Image (cartoon, rainbow, N blue to C red):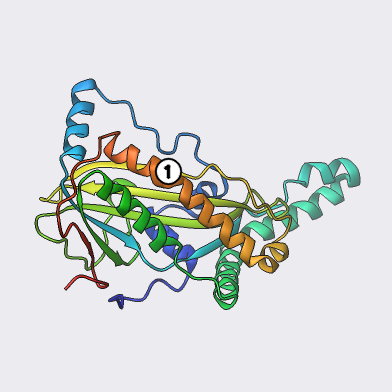
Amino acid sequence: MKLPNPLPRSFMDLLRLDAGMSLQKLTSLIVATALLAGCAADASKPTLLARQEATRSAAKVELIYNEEDQLIVTDGGGSGLTGFAGLLLGPIGALLALSIDTNSRMTMAARTDQRSKEFTAAVRNSGAAMTLNRQFAERLAARLRESGREVKLTPFMRATGPAGEMKVPELQPTPGYSTLILRITTAYGAADATSSFKPFISVEQLLRDERQSVVHQTAHTADVTEPTYFSYDGLLKDTAMAHEGLKQGLDRIVQPAYAGMFGGDQPRAIPAEATRTAGLDAK
């Protein structure tokens, strides 16, 4: 399936489109695992019950996901050693360290864009299948089918906008289906330019009913810390293991993503012709 529009050239631009966030907030999101990701916000019991009923009653779901794997590599910039340099080398050392630290932060966007493209190309050239997003979507779709729902898989462009208002440009939802939009992020991040790179995997979900009214949203991050790389060069030289680490992280999110959105409903009888994949086996 050919996407109607090319994806943004810059990885940083791509992620900024997610929520119109500042670069500093963006990096904080990627390099630090959200402590409360996937947790439901406080809600009154009637509101919670109504939401649960709405999600569980979705019998036909069109699952839309960003098809193309984009492997992001970023760091927070700076070294975190400015104060330490001042203690060891005095005022001049502190000023020098501050200058280096500031320059590192100023070049963070360009560094992220270059490294992300290099890493993605290295993984692709290694022969690894660039199907992380598709495999996750298929596993989540299989879990939905186990509950008796009819599922239509639609690979498309990456959704844009804040998590609670995600939209997929130019997409026409299938009539009669609730729409479940996934925004999948796979990255290696470091707290600063001298810290180790660790995997960061995030899946945001937004469910809309047949009238395209928002029903519920969730966000989940994978609780993984391995593999860890002390330098970007080490990451670049170990593409097979690094790629596998991202896959394992996504695998861990499948069940939490399902339960967070649809709860613990029991499997239902699966009707015939309940499986369709737009652009693949749908006619």
Q: Position of residue 257 (x, y in %)?
A: 37, 43
Residue positioned 24% across, 43% down in the render: 147
Question: Callout 1, which amino acid?
Answer: His
Q: Where does residue 129 sit, x and y in percent of width and height?
A: 49, 71
- Which quadrant would residue 136 be assigned to in this image? bottom left
Q: In the figure, residue 225 lies in which quadrant?
A: top right
Task: Give the residue number, with chain letter if any, for mark 1.
Answer: 220
Left or right: 95 in relation to 51: right
Q: Is 235 placed left or right of 221 in the picture?
A: right
Estimate the x, y position of residue 110 in percent, counting from the top left.
Answer: 58, 67
* 14 lies left or right of 211: right
Quadrant location, the N terminus: bottom left
Q: Please tell me which residue is depicted at 67% across the width and 67% down the height of the picture.
A: 236
Q: Residue furthest top?
A: 45
Closer-to-camera residue (233/175) = 175
Q: Residue at x 45, y 56 (%)?
A: 185
Q: Residue at (79%, 51%) from the top-left corner?
A: 95
